[in-house]
Image (cartoon, rainbow, N blue to C red):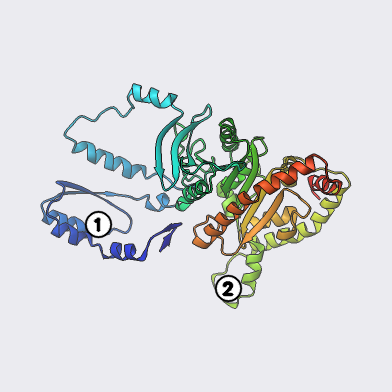
Amino acid sequence: MSVLGHCYPPDLVDQIKAVNLCDVANTASSLARSVLLVDTDYGESPALKTTLQTRGIDVATARLPDWSNLMLDSAHSRLPLEAIDSVTRWIIARSRFPVPNARPHPTIAAEFSTQDSLVNAVAEGVEEQVVWIGPDRLVGTLCSPAETDPVRPGVPAWLIANTAANPRMADGRFAVRLAREMARYGVVTLRVDVSGVGDSGEHGPDDQSGVLYSDQTITDMASAANWLAARGHQEVIAFGICSGGYAALHAAMRASSLAGVVAINLPRFVWPTGLTVAEATRQRINSSRGYLASARSWRKWTRLLRERRDLRPIARILARSIIARFRLPTIQIAERLGWRPAITTERGVMQELNRRGVATLLVYGEFDPGINELHRHFGRTHQAFDGWRHVRVETVAQLDHALFGISGRNAVMDLCVQMLTHWSERKAEVARLCCGKDAGPRRKMTSAQNGT
């Protein structure tokens, strides 16, 4: 069973299904004197409450009315403050001792504020430590090969961005798996929490949607890349999924230490000023290819007519695709004649990264909505960056947007490993071109930098 990227073996699932808390309460040799049952909207605690009370247990109940909001994705999830207050009051009312001051001891706080790293853990050839980064004291996990497996020379370190507002382990702990796999290849990685997410920042906002595409997030990623560079890593590759890919892409515009970017299911190349995540979510629809595939399904047409769905959003995106198909050749011709798009535009951003020699890999699921943005500004997927020496696109069948699926995760891992294995070859080619030893490729390089 796979739940949001977490895989559970069948025997564990069977064991969980077999658990009946009422039976456990009836047969347990000892139980707590008091129990608090926090009930969701499902309302399944009365039977357990009755069972516990027959055993002489003091049972109280509290509601969790915000259950549905709590279980949303990280950008839209909200803390169940009412339930937290209820649990806190219940614990305090039954405490035998005075409730201590919640503030940390000054000595401990001072120790944490001056340390640069804490906690070393070594297992299966991987060493990890919690680190503090830059003046804003961002919190990250530095993952390295254990001393028995030294770092491979000539390969870049990897910087792993937050996915949406998830802490640095990412959905289904994918960032942890990626970091440890890289360590086994002799590569150092840093997975970092940007300000307001996970352990970074004094106060994380309950509404974290404003963090995802913010300028501060990009600044934090650039700061983390420079921190790695200061520790001796001459080249760094930034990796991110969805909004993390956006932060990685734009951090490479600011940090010269970033030599590469891997962006998975990038939703936009440029985030419009004033656009909220909520509004962008409402605007997001399926890819054009997805709609064309659905158009061939009689079952989809029957459902559409039965539910009387609004076709206007679909019509708008298909119209934009048609307009872009005629508009893009005009832009490309203008670029060949010397016109340059502003660096704040979609083509301007990618041309600047290409000009700087930043190895950029864009990876999309075949039906990911982000492909619409790629087609609008750069053309069809496998022709989008023809002639661009440092930018390429890959599509992966069955790759879901947040990498919950096992096959998609494995495919992305393979692409990252391939990027590593070919890195030395790429460096040699770039060095040869920079030295001007081959006039033909040099002319091609100049063309690629012009975005043609």
Residue 295 lies, in percent from the top left, at 64, 72
Could you say which quadrant of the image residue 44 lies in? bottom left
Quick check: 42 left or right of 246? Answer: left
Taking the image as drawn, is residue 379 in sight?
yes
Q: Which residue corresponds to mark 1?
A: 45
Indicate whether 10 appears above or below 141. Answer: below
Could you say which quadrant of the image residue 224 lies in? top right
Mark found first going from the N terminus, 2 or 1: 1
Taking the image as drawn, is residue 351 in sight?
no
Q: What residue is at 58 percent from the left and 30 percent from the top?
A: 230
User: How many numbered marks have been drawn onto this rendered protein structure?
Assistant: 2
> In front: 242, or 302?
242
Check disc 2 and report its element: helix, strand or loop: helix
> In front: 260, or 4?
260
| Distance Cα–Cα, label 2 vs label 1 | 40 Å
Q: Which residue corresponds to mark 2?
A: 300
Q: What residue is at 56 percent from the left and 64 percent from the top?
A: 398
Could you say which quadrant of the image residue 123 lies in? top left
Residue 10 lies, in percent from the top left, at 36, 66
Q: Amino acid at mark 2?
A: Lys
